[in-house]
Image (cartoon, helix red, strand yellow):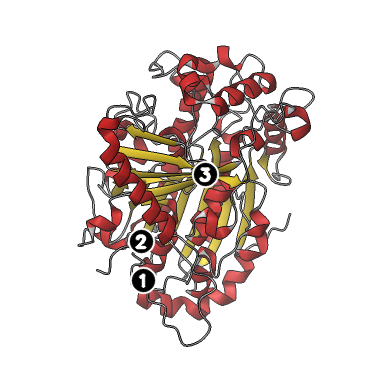
Amino acid sequence: MKHRTIFPYCVGTCIAISSLQAKEKSPNIVLIMTDQQRADFLAREGYPIDTMPFVDELASNGTWFNKAYTSSPASVPARTSLLTGRFPKATHVRNNQNEVDAYFEKDMFHVLEEKGYATALVGKNHSYLRSDRLDYWSEYNHGGKVGSSGTEKGDAFDRFLKETQLYASFEPAPGGIESQPVYRMVDEATEWIKHVKGQPFMLWLSFAEPHNPYQTCEPYFSMFRDKLPSLQTSAKDRRMKGERYETLAEMMELGHVGYSQQLDELHSIYLGMMRMIDDQIRRFTDNLKNQDLYDNTIFIFISDHGDYVGEYGLMKKGAGLDEIASRIPMQWSGPGIKTSGRPHNAHVSMVDIFPTICEIINVPIPAGAQGRSLWPLLQGKPYPEKEFESIYVEHGYGGQFYTKKDDTDYLTEGAITKNKYFFDELNSWTQSGFTKMVRKGDWKLIFDMEGNGQLYNLRRDPLELKNLFEIKKYSQTKTNLLQELLKWEIATGDPLPLPRRRYHFKKNEHNYMFNDM
């Protein structure tokens, strides 16, 4: 693994640009990302357990959204969208296997580097990025640090993680909190920042948790064991969700034998992992305060997608565009961002983050970016509400739907392995074909390439169990949402490459797609 360090780099470069940056007072940017975190598992969303009190406190001191969505509920497509501000159909990255095919003009780290920012990734990448693109690179994944951790204790814990086979540990993890990747990442990020002098920085602090392997140490392992709220659905409800969900459960039982009897334990561990992350985010921000950097730092907190966490009798993700997989936490806090104790009403997307950062640091939004800048919204300034009255999400890599009629050889395809300790929920049965969704207010429409539709009222049916698509009473609502989906489908057609001669390409300053405010 290449490990490009900024420490010697900073000595010459920081002095050269320090006077310019001091005049501009460019804010530092910390993008904190979790992996596979449910948006509705936060107390501010009404969850009965206070899983992330510090994250909620940060949100209350800034702006947060309860209608924020991933671009696609799979890691690589979502992370590629985050970095480029483009939907998967434009990046060409529609699944976890095609990161090298990413198509774009400029990404987040291009514009930050051009603006004079020091850049770092500490944590999970799972995108097209490579180590030579950033000033500092320390990669962690679900098996711990990529390469040696540099300590005997860290290496021992990473061996333990690999022994979980990406599933779970039903005993408290060894080594205490100091062995956990989230703790080690905070140490590394803090140490890097200490060496960034006179230069604004952008840190992507990308935790690989609470994604499986579901594991944590005490006190987190036992913290919520006796406080678990009841699940809202069961395996019986899975039947009405369709064949993909049943196939997913069948494969999951083969890959993680007995998982359906372990849902409560997995649920408890998952919540403990969230609190573990929360404590480390608090520790990280305390470190910034000690370095007198907190007040000039913008914090963005998101996740790439969600997790079933027992709903429909499932864990992980994979089968569809349910809210619990597609909706994500998103919050912003820091200089210039309005404080609001209530969620913002706008419908927003992960693809909006890159254009927003561009406007914050005062650089043009690159050609091909499809997201809208949220900077006016975050500042409490006027914005066209119709621009943000709906949002759009994609699923699938194309082709015809691969079904059980075609094959059930999960072993050959790679969804499970011979020893039956590994199971990949993102496979041919769950990811083939194309499905799109649009959310507008209380309503959600899902539509696939075969013309199958789903219509849900999320206020009355948040777990999407009652499909109203064929109910005559809701025909006008269905028509309106189909028009909204078509509008998004057309608007997100890729403009790249731009015309080379003569034609003028019109673009709103905030990259609004539907309004010219």
- Mark seen at residue 247: none
Give the side of residue 170 with respect to residue 442, left or right.
right
- Determine the residue positioned at 46% across, 53% down: 31
**Circle 2: element type:** helix
Residues at circles 1 and 3 in contact by the CB criterion of under 8 Å: no
Residue 143: x %, y % from top left: 67, 37
Name the residue carrying label 2. Answer: 296
Whole-angstrom CA distance, mark 1 to mark 3, is: 49 Å
405 or 510, nearer to the observer: 405
Q: Residue furthest bottom?
A: 502
Binning the other alpha carbons within 10 Å of mark 3 as few (below 14), some (14 to 19) or many (20 upward) gives some
Please name the amino acid that badge 1 sits on.
Lys
Please name the amino acid that badge 2 sits on.
Asn
Of labels 2 and 3, earlier in sequence is: 2
Is residue 422 shown above or below 155? above
Name the residue carrying label 3. Answer: 449
**Circle 3: element type:** loop
Q: Residue furthest left?
A: 382
Residues at circles 1 and 2 in contact by the CB criterion of under 8 Å: yes
Whole-angstrom CA distance, mark 2 to mark 3, is: 47 Å
Please name the amino acid that badge 3 sits on.
Met
Of labels 1 and 2, earlier in sequence is: 1
Is residue 443 shown above or below 289? above
Name the residue carrying label 1. Answer: 25
Binning the other alpha carbons within 10 Å of mark 2 as few (below 14), some (14 to 19) or many (20 upward) gives some
Give the side of residue 7 with respect to residue 320, left or right.
right
Residue 297: x %, y % from top left: 38, 58
337 or 320, nearer to the observer: 320
